[in-house]
């Protein structure tokens, strides 16, 4: 009897080992090879999250928050720049990827220390300086029982950078962030400060929101905020062809739906064929869990980075998410917790490659056909796609250079690319084809990423850009505020 039990135990252990061995070896291998090869920039140089934009600048000027009057000092800096005939760029967390915070030989204003905030609980308005990053905003609001209405899916970005690209997230039934901005104070090129809002300086309000720092320095912002809430997760893993129907039948019209996103399978054999829908419903009865740093960082990083390196890693990640995630079903989250993840956890730290984001928006009736186009274009260019999330964005009626001119479906894609000319050339060719596909589907692409779109594609996607740049010249005739985006698509291309 005893020896039979022993044999059974040994066989069981062997079976378990054979099931676990490959995933364990894969994860260990990824962890061992995941060496931090990020290096400091040489003095006088700046770059952005692409790690492809290293550029020499004249000065990196940090807002001196300890001085008596930082705003007067910013105005003095602008006069100095005018005298020296230098261009000025404004930088938050520099997670844009196309040199939107960079001008060669220019002066970069680092806004990050400019990060004070104050909450009016009576009005539900947060006044926050533009350099504050969401991680600090969420912590501040969480302590008071409040939360952010609309922001990105990560917490590493500055408020100024977020409203200057008019970001959006996966908060359900919401337009981009501009819809939550009541007003802001803007320092114009001449150093004068104006309040822009829904009843004063309304044109400048719509231009600077999503205006990529071209109209002045946003000093502080009045953001509408909401109560923090307790949510329950429900998940659905379905073939991509059924995703919209599943969403309509089981998610869309439920009044307690608060946040939702879907993720697609990126493994080669089943490329974009399956979708996992993650829907978060209000669950008001019970304690709201306290805010914490995201858990199991190392494991999540190994699963994610492992999927960048191998096909097995992509299959493993999808299986882990779809087989292990159901254990999370019914799990409770706070709204703040869902938005409290830093990009650093997943960041590419290799010297040879970098992660590049793309985002395309199409009307819902073109969603299926656009995915069919992605399914052809990406493998043709051997794009190493790490992640696709799908979100819904409502119409934006606030910004001038708007991407959401109606309700749209957004595809956010993260690719790995080599940090060399070949990698850049291949990424550009694929991006241009994806943009063409979005345009053919009455959609457009998002502007904070690489500047691979041709001028014609940019104009087709943003027909209002001509009027946008005309107004830029009215408000900033000396073109003091410039960046690589302006150099490429502005009124006088160089
Ligand atoms: C990993 C990752 C995930 C992302 N996820 C999302 C997402 O879910 N949704 C989404 O919409 N976007 C997303 N983005 C894009 C992101 O929202 C933008 O890149 C955003 O600009 C980042 O904020 P930042 O503080 O890094 O801005 P920066 O890159 O520092 O600046 C962006 C632009 O804003 C201007 N700017 C910054 N501060 C000011 C100011 N105070 N006054 C005037 N102009 C200013 C800059 O000049 C620049 O043109 C993501 C980006 C990355 C890298």
Image (tube, rainbow, N blue to C red):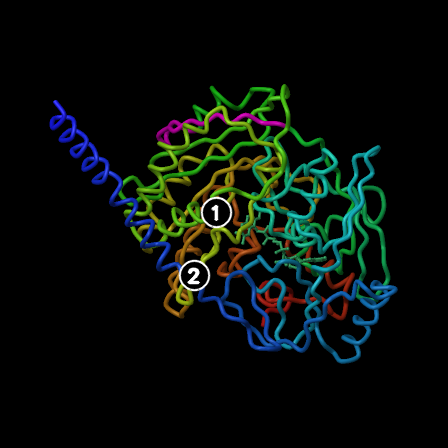
Q: Is residue 206 above or below residue 332?
A: below
Residue 479 seen in the current view: no
Q: Is residue 446 above or below residue 247?
A: below
Residue 440 location in percent, x, y?
A: 45, 45
Residue lying farthest bottom? 84
The residue that appears at 68% across and 43% down in the rendered structure is 139
Q: Is residue 392 magenta?
A: no
Residue 431 location in percent, x, y?
A: 44, 55
Q: Nearer the viewer, residue 328 or 159?
A: 328
For mark 1, give the secondary structure.
helix
Q: Quadrant of residue 197?
A: top right
Give the magenta range.
Answer: 230-243
Disc 2 to disc 1, C-alpha distance: 32 Å
The quarter of the image holding the N terminus is top left
Residue with the mark numbered 2: 428
Q: Is residue 25 left or right of residue 194?
A: left
Residue 490 seen in the current view: yes
Q: Is residue 308 left or right of residue 444?
A: left
Residue 476 location in percent, x, y?
A: 77, 65
The residue that appears at 81% across and 53% down in the rendered structure is 185
């Amino acid at each position: 009897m005893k020896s039979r039990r022993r044999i059974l135990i040994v066989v069981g252990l062997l079976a378990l080992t054979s099931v676990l061995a490959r995933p364990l070896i894969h994860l260990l291998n990824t962890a061992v090879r995941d060496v931090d090869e990020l290096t400091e920039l040489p003095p006088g140089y700046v770059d952005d999250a692409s790690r492809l934009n290293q550029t020499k600048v004249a000065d990196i000027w940090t807002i001196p928050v300890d001085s008596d009057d930082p705003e007067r000092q910013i105005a003095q800096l602008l006069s100095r720049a005018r005298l020296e005939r230098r261009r000025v760029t404004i930088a938050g967390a520099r997670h844009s990827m196309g040199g939107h915070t960079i001008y060669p030989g220019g002066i970069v204003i680092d806004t990050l220390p400019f990060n004070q905030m104050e909450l009016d609980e009576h009005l539900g308005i947060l006044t926050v300086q533009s350099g504050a990053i969401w991680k600090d905003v969420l912590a501040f609001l969480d302590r008071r029982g409040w939360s952010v209405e609309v922001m990105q899916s990560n917490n590493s970005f500055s408020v100024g950078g977020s409203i200057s690209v008019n970001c959006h997230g996966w908060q359900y039934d919401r337009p981009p962030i501009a819809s939550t901005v009541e007003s802001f104070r803007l320092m114009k090129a001449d150093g004068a400060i104006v309040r822009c809002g829904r009843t004063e300086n309304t044109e400048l309000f719509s231009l600077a929101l999503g205006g990529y720092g071209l109209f002045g320095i946003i000093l502080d912002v009045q953001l509408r905020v909401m109560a923090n809430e307790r949510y329950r997760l429900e998940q659905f893993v379905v073939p991509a062809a059924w995703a919209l129907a599943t969403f309509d039948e089981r998610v869309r019209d439920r009044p307690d739906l608060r946040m939702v996103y879907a993720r697609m399978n990126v493994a080669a054999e089943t490329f974009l064929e399956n979708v996992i829908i993650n829907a978060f419903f209000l669950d008001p009865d019970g304690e709201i869990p306290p805010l914490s740093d995201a858990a199991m960082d190392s494991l999540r990083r190994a699963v994610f980075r492992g999927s960048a390196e191998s096909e097995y890693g992509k299959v493993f990640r999808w299986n882990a998410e779809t087989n292990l995630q159901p254990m999370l079903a019914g799990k409770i989250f706070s709204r703040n917790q869902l938005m409290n993840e830093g990009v650093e956890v997943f960041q590419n730290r290799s010297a040879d490659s970098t992660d590049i984001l793309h985002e395309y928006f199409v009307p819902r009736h073109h969603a299926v056909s656009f995915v069919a186009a992605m399914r052809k274009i990406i493998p043709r260019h051997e794009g190493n796609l790490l992640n696709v999330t799908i979100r819904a964005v409502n119409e934006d009626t606030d910004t001038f250079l708007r991407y959401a001119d109606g309700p749209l479906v957004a595809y956010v894609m993260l690719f790995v690319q080599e940090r060399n000319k070949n990698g850049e050339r291949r990424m550009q060719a694929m991006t241009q084809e994806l943009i063409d596909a979005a345009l053919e589907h009455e959609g457009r692409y998002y502007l904070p990423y690489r500047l691979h779109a041709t001028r014609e594609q940019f104009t087709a996607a943003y027909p209002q850009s001509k009027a946008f740049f005309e107004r830029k010249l009215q408000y900033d005739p000396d073109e003091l505020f410039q960046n690589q985006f302006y150099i490429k698509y502005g009124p006088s291309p160089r």
